[in-house]
Amino acid sequence: MPRGQQPPCLPPCGGGEAKDSTRSELLKASPEAEDGNIEYKLKLVNPSQYRFEHLVTQRKWRLQEGRGEAVYQIGVEDNGLLVGLAEEEMRASLKTLHRMAEKVGADITVLREREVDYDSDMPRKITEVLVRKVPDNQQFLDLRVAVLGNVDSGKSTLLGVLTQGELDNGRGRARLNLFRHLHEIQSGRTSSISFEILGFNSKGEVVNYSDSRTAEEICESSSKMITFIDLAGHHKYLHTTIFGLTSYCPDCALLLVSANTGIAGTTREHLGLALALKVPFFIVVSKVDLCAKTTVERTVRQLERVLKQPGCHKVPMLVTSEDDAVTAAQQFAQSPNVTPIFTLSSVSGESLDLLKVFLNILPPLTNSKEQEELMQQLTEFQVDEIYTVPEVGTVVGGTLSSGICREGDQLVVGPTDDGCFLELRVCSIQRNRSACRVLRAGQAATLALGDFDRALLRKGMVMVSPEMNPTICSVFEAEIVLLFHATTFRRGFQVTVHVGNVRQTAVVEKIHAKDKLRTGEKAVVRFRFLKHPEYLKVGAKLLFREGVTKGIGHVTDVQAIAAGEAQANMGF
């Protein structure tokens, strides 16, 4: 179903004493959508062979729409009327669902059952079932979640608990395996971007590092993988957080708020970044074990007030039960305005299971048509990280923006400082630390480049198909909104520009139709990169900052230059 359409979640059932008009509203969900991964079925009792084959074809379509996941609501008519089924009919319908699952090689899990009051003496139920099948061309379903929040809100600790399978001791033991640098362990504060994985098998059970599993074993045992991008909370590392949000293309973000401090420090800033970059987000209120219930409630009310403000326009949804978690996952995927709020503890484990239920059911937030269109385009891989691995050579990490990348592919990488693109070969590919032969648009991975000279590479480069004939620029124009500036924004002002994986200082060359800009004003501005040319595309989201100055916008025009002209255009 397209994002923004009214979600077809099941409303509360019951209310026998209500007026007929009220009850008819209660017994109605939104009509079934032709696209999307949610299917209504009144009943599936002993279908004929022809009908069974038709149902299997229909299921394949729903699985394709959900990129491997579909939700069946049994006991619901196509117009959304909640009729319910008697126990015997429900049992027969679920048996048919199992047969259909076997036919397509899928697994099914009952999410929830609800009794419905529908003018009947016999109890009638509606059952919601999750169908999951890993597409034939994929190893597992993949979802990327960026983790945001103020310093010391418990981001790394929560990820440690989820991925290691052990609760924290209250002094940060759970986060130690996530840190990459000695100073992070000593200070307890994340300064770099790290990736953690959490798997779910076909039955919805958690697969993580408990039981001494390796990353490869987690990938092999999982039908769905959640990749957490752990970002820095301290204001000093804000540039790292922005880079993580713009370059790693997360499907959604998890904003962590400490129950005892509420909205403090960089929380508002991180919330603003998610809104500006249009990244859907949900909120986790942590450390509830340290606070009285009234303090937790006060923090939740504070969050609800902020989310309802004109700048956010969000609909907060507090998750307090497993039923809420199922509804939240479906509504979050279908409506960009719904923002689930979880309250949990990484020490006592309170409500941790509700977050796991939510992550297990949460479907991919991009539809299959968008994915197919991207895969038809030429290969484009964003370089976000560069390593040297013994006996492997140079390795780059990043995201495939479009096309398909295979082992042995010949690509070109650039632009270099003089604007050139260099030929290279992809020797091998790894996703989530396990070998992978084919990489598809939207997936993140590391590519081994053999003996290619690491000194020629930098973050912000792209690896593209030679047929693309990539264009580069030193000068570009963007339509921007100045979010905040202490005085006036004028020609000659220098800012750090973030566009996808590109991060470089640029100078304002011209503000069209205006001499200066003040906070809240909009204009088309011409920027010039100071150091080297970059690969930019018209329409790309742009974010710039310098001290307290912040602005957002999108690229409207790029002044393409040839490789030989690059150094002259940079003013060298």
Image: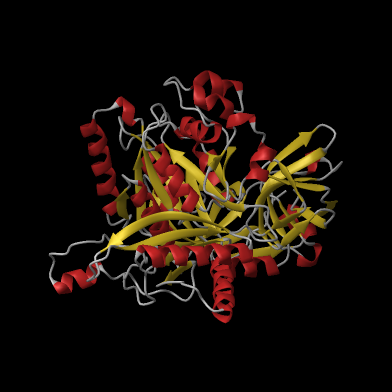
Q: Position of residue 176 (x, y in %)?
A: 55, 24
Residue nearer the viewer, 277 or 143: 143
Where residue 559 sits, quadrant-wise, is: bottom right
Where residue 209 sits, quadrant-wise, is: top right
Q: Position of residue 34 (x, y in %)?
A: 47, 76
Q: Residue furthest bottom?
A: 50
Where residue 468 sits, quadrant-wise, is: bottom right
> In the rendered view, would you say 163 is above or below 305?
above
Residue nearer the viewer, 423 or 44: 44
Q: Is residue 193 left or right of residue 424?
A: left
Q: Can I make out residue 160 in this image?
A: yes
Residue drawn at 27 percent across, 53 percent down: 309
Residue nearer the viewer, 17 or 135: 17
> In the rendered view, would you say 177 is above or below 296?
above
Q: Position of residue 133 (x, y in %)?
A: 60, 59
> In the rendered view, would you say 191 is above or below 216?
above
